[in-house]
């Protein structure tokens, strides 16, 4: 189920950066408990990110669509602070970071 959840999260894009939020490194943890309850720890590119008002809700809504998921809890943290070294190789290539 965790793989399906991650694939669903990969359909969500940062509104200002043309990379999905998983490869961007905004998802710090995805935990699926035996009772099909999902806990996600995520961050935003900055604490003042305009997407803060809706991106966590978008993650919750998307993950709830995964078959078998019973409940979803999304927690936004700002430590460790996000930086571009957290991006996947795929994201770094897409954005021309070395």
Image (cartoon, helix red, strand yellow):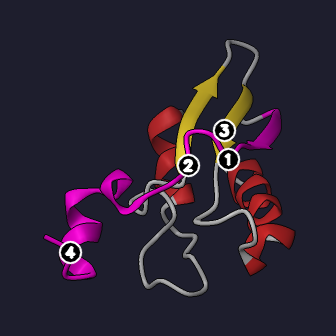
Find the magenta span and give its range: 70-98
In this rendering, the count of numbered labels is 4
Marks 3,1: beta carbons within 8 A = no
Helix or strand or loop: what does disc 3 sit on?
strand
Establish if 22 lies above or below 74.
below
Marks 4,2: beta carbons within 8 A = no
Marks 2,1: beta carbons within 8 A = yes
Helix or strand or loop: what does disc 4 sit on?
loop
Label drawn at residue 97? 4
Q: Looking at the figure, which quarter contains the C terminus?
A: bottom left
Tell whether position 97 is magenta: yes
Can residue 68 be seen here? The reply is no
Marks 3,2: beta carbons within 8 A = no
Q: Which residue is drawn at 29% across and 69% down?
A: 91
Can residue 27 be seen here? The reply is yes
Going from N to C along the chain, the mark reached first, 1 or 4, is 1
Label drawn at residue 2? none
Going from N to C along the chain, the mark reached first, 4 or 2, is 2
Q: How crowded is mark 3: few (under 14 residues within 10 Å), some or many (20 or more)?
A: some
* Residue underneath mark 1: 78
Label drawn at residue 81? 2
Marks 4,3: beta carbons within 8 A = no
* Residue underneath mark 3: 41
Helix or strand or loop: what does disc 2 sit on?
loop
Going from N to C along the chain, the mark reached first, 3 or 1, is 3
């Amino acid at each position: 189920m965790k793989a399906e959840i991650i694939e669903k999260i990969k359909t969500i894009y940062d509104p200002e950066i043309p990379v999905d939020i998983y490869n961007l490194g905004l998802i710090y943890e995805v935990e699926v408990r035996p009772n099909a309850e999902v806990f996600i720890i995520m961050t935003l590119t900055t604490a003042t990110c305009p997407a803060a008002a809706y991106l966590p809700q978008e993650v919750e809504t998307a993950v709830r669509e995964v078959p078998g998921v019973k409940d979803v809890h999304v927690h936004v943290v700002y430590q460790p602070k996000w930086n571009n070294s957290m991006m996947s190789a795929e994201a770094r290539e897409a954005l021309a970071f070395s």
